[in-house]
Image (cartoon, coloured by chain):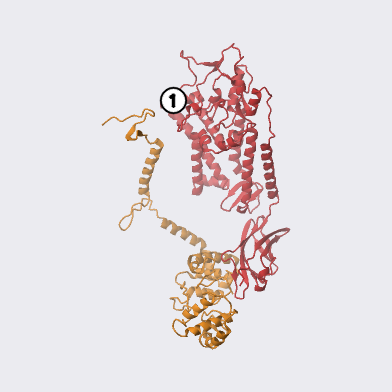
Amino acid sequence: MTVHTVISPDKRPVLAADGVVRSDAVASNSAANRKLFAARVPIYPKEGSGQYRSFKWAMMAITLTIYYVTPWLRWNRGLSAPNQAVLVDLAHERFYFFFIEIWPQEVYYITGLLILSAVALFLINALFGRLWCGYSCPQTVWTDLFIWIETKIEGDRNARMRLAAAPWSMSKIAKRISKHTVWLLFAVATGGAWVFYYNDAPTLLHQLLTGTASYGNYFAVLGLTFTTYTLGGLMREQVCTYMCPWPRIQAAMTDNEALCVTYRRDRGEPRGAHKKGDSWEGRGSCIDCNQCVAVCPMGIDIRDGAQLECINCGLCIDACDDVMRKIGQPRRLIAYDTEANISRRQHGEAARYRFVRPRTVLYAGVLAGVSAVMLLTLTFRHTLDLDVLRDRNPDYVRLADGAVRNAYTLKLMNRGREARTLDLSVSGVKARQVRLIGDGEIVSSVPLRVDADKVRTVRVLVTVARADLSASHGLTFSLAAGGEKREVDAVFVPGAAR
Amino acid sequence: MSKREIDQVSGTETTGHEWDGIKELDTPMPRWWLVAFWATIIWSIAYWVVYPAWPGISSYTHGIWDHSQRDEVTANVAVLKAERAGREAALAKASLADIQNNPDLLQFAMAEGKTAFGDNCAPCHGAGGQGGHGYPNLNDDVWLWGGKLSDIEHTITVGVRSTAANTRESQMPGFGRDAVLKPAQVDDLAEYVLHISGRPADARAVKRATGLFADNCAGCHGPEGKGDRKFGAPNLTDNEWEYGPTRDDIHDQIWNGHGGVMPTWGGRLSPEEIKALAIYVHNLGGGE
């Protein structure tokens, strides 16, 4: 791969049309070249410009800003909790997200979040294809960033290909070293930013720089440096093609009404070189200049149709529009379009966009439903909670006089910002005695002090006299403070009759 | 050396092996595989140098880092001990009653007691202290040697029928085995015990055994069979049976006079650990 444009025998570039040279770029995944085991075909994406390129730059700026800045945002929670807006506090088992605080007992919020993410992905996919892959997936964003760095240091596509083919020289070594150094610096920054989500960012930054941070943090930074450098710099499109499950899932979920980056073959074919002054009658608009292939970060030819390698980033649209402008043809020969529209136009019908389809309605419905439930539960989240775990070993204890005792471990949770006194009471069982270990007998209720944002564990023993056993199957633990009250039903096991 | 055959289709050398016309290609190893292979060899050499690796006659090569997992554990345990020293000292000083009334110390003692129980007591008494045939249940309110905190602490310290000089000691005779009583008398006594524990029994046998019980059993178990903690003699009227509740079980116990052994923990566990264990067992629910 040393030449970048098709050269005719008289050493002049072959023109695809007047003013447009034909590139010798070949799709890395074309059916003709595909082998069972193929070495990677190096891809040197050409830097383009245009509407979608600008959008992709903007998305890169936004997503990277969010990633790097978020851990530094502060959020005042008072003295009992950290003031970092987004923090996964593993040591204290808390997750903070602005006004939300999640305890390990509330993993269902994480489940809800994952459901939301998945359904949102499905919905976007059904509407606009793989927008996620094209613009916001960390893999493609970082790959884009790394390609940009490569372009700045080694030059654009042709220069990079020349450099790759050139023998080793001081200048080549210098360029390669500086490229990999800058890549590594970005990779370190990426790994470095990640650990801030798990620690107080200013404190950890100081620790990292003074060598006093824990090994875990250094290893996390090292690990993410390695993965960022490898996945973003060296493996790039192979991650999407070979490692990521989403292209496969998407292939199964997409339909022919989804907007995808599409070559309008109804307009482009038959393709071929065009000479100035030739008529456009009886031929397609595609002049086979391969510019769409040259800019593709995945190294594919969009004209081969929908394919799992395509990340729907639209860079080929920009490249093709550029060419169409030069040869005076209408733009958007490659565009966000649907398979259904191509066949409609081929049958002489007008193109139309059906955003409201059963699957989009379904996805939107699920999305709205789960969001509503999440929002509701988060808004009315209890600051007071009670977990009851009945002893199962032994299941029950029979006393000398035939009475039966069950033991319960209670977790009293105070999610409030202040220490509170919670009133614990037991009802629903005719107990001879209800005893709190370390605190004596509970007559009506017992006040228990629980520190701010803490769990207190107590053990309660409930004894039922022999005569009342047959009527005792359950009981209710109540925890009350201020206006809040939590009730938990528990089982009482009377034991085998004797 | 003969020239090796080149496969026409793949252009790769063959190994020269052939089975029914099928020839084996001598495909070279992938480069990455070879690199990984050599890397592991280099790694292992580095490992020998740095870490303990080769066994010797009486010792082993320690490696230049002189690393030892045992040392690491010892260091970690020391750190943990230092961290707990304050509470451990408080535990040593506090009386059992004080611990029971101090929530912080109680929690510490319970945690330590639970670990010590799992390590030392659970094999016989069960993970939850529920006991089993021949091993007392520690959850209920039936105590052979007393259920107060101090009783429990003492029992743990000296054991039962153990090797300690001041062990809790008593031995029920094997009335049948040692021919103290006639077989028929043992049968009658079993009926009698069934009777006083409130269960149906042969009335004539009970009548015959009344005198036998007063002569042979009441000395330890008391005239009404309510037991006596001085001798660790169980209450025979409460329907809790260490050696089983059936007539056959009771007969077997009178015949053989089983007496389980609990080892002394005084020399093996520290006084603080025993204290914590007593608190833990007491708080299983049956403590008095």
The answer to whether residue B128 is above or below residue B28 is below
A144 vs A235, nearest the viewer: A235
Q: Which chain is red?
A: A
Q: Where is residue B29 drawn, in percent x and y?
A: 38, 36
A305 vs B163, nearest the viewer: A305
Chain bearing mark 1: A
Whether residue A450 is visible to the viewer of this picture, yes or no, is yes
Residue B251 shown left or right of residue A389 in the figure? left
Q: Secondary structure at mark 1?
A: helix
Q: Where is residue B288 drawn, in percent x and y?
A: 59, 74
- Check the rendered structure and report the hue given to chain B: orange
B120 vs B192, nearest the viewer: B192
Q: Quadrant of residue B245?
A: bottom right
Q: Where is residue A103 drawn, in percent x and y?
A: 62, 52
The amino acid pointed to by label 1 is Ala
Whether residue B144 is visible to the viewer of this picture, yes or no, is no
Q: Name the residue furthest left.
A: B1
Residue located beneath label 1 in the image: A165
